[in-house]
Image (cartoon, rainbow, N blue to C red):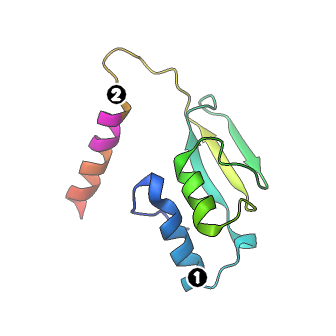
Amino acid sequence: MLKPSTFMNLSGKAVLYWLKKEKIHTNNLIVILDDLNINFGVSRLKPSGSHGGHNGLKDITNSLNTSNFPRLRFGIGNNFKKKGFSWRRFYWQINSSRRRRR
C-alpha cells in the first residue's frame, strides 16, 4: 500500500516511482480515492476509465500514460454546511498537521 506524501494533484509521480522501483505492473495496481461527487458512504469499483475530473487520478493517468487500471472511489459527498466551510482551509489544516508530525 502506498500513500503518497506529495500533494494529491501530483500523486502520479509517486505512483510511477514506486511501480518502477518495485517492478510492479499496472495489472497489480488499484487506486483508492475519495470523491466529492459520490454520496457519503457509497463506493464504486471500476476496472478502468477516465479520471472523471479528479485531479489526483488525472495526474496518475498522465504519469502512467494509461487509464487501464482499477480504481475504487469512496464517496464523501458534497452536502457540507456551506456557510463558513472552506475546502482550501480544510486542506491546509490537514497538511499543516502532517508537516508538524514529521
In the displayed structure, 98 sits above or below 35; it is: below
Q: Could you tell me which residue is drawn at 64 percent across and 32 percent down?
A: 38
The residue nearer to you, when weighing 37 against 1, is: 37
Q: Classify residue 97 as left or right of residue 27.
A: left
Q: Could you tell me which residue is drawn at 56 percent across and 43 percent down?
A: 34
Q: Classify residue 81 as left or right of residue 23.
A: left
Can you give x and y, in whole percent of width and height, for residue 30 in the image?
67, 62
**Amino acid under label 1?**
Lys
Q: Earlier in the sequence, mark 2 or mark 1?
A: 1
In the displayed structure, 58 sits above or below 28; it is: above
Cα separation between marks 2 and 1:
37 Å
Q: Which residues are magenta?
A: 88-93
Residue to which mark 1 is pinned: 20
Residue 89 covered by magenta stretch: yes
Give the quarter of the image for residue 76.
Answer: top right
Residue to which mark 2 is pinned: 86
Q: Could you tell me which residue is drawn at 62 percent across and 42 percent down?
A: 74
Q: Could you tell me which residue is drawn at 40 percent across and 55 percent down?
A: 7
Q: Main secondary structure of the magenta part?
A: helix
Quadrant where the N terminus lies? bottom right
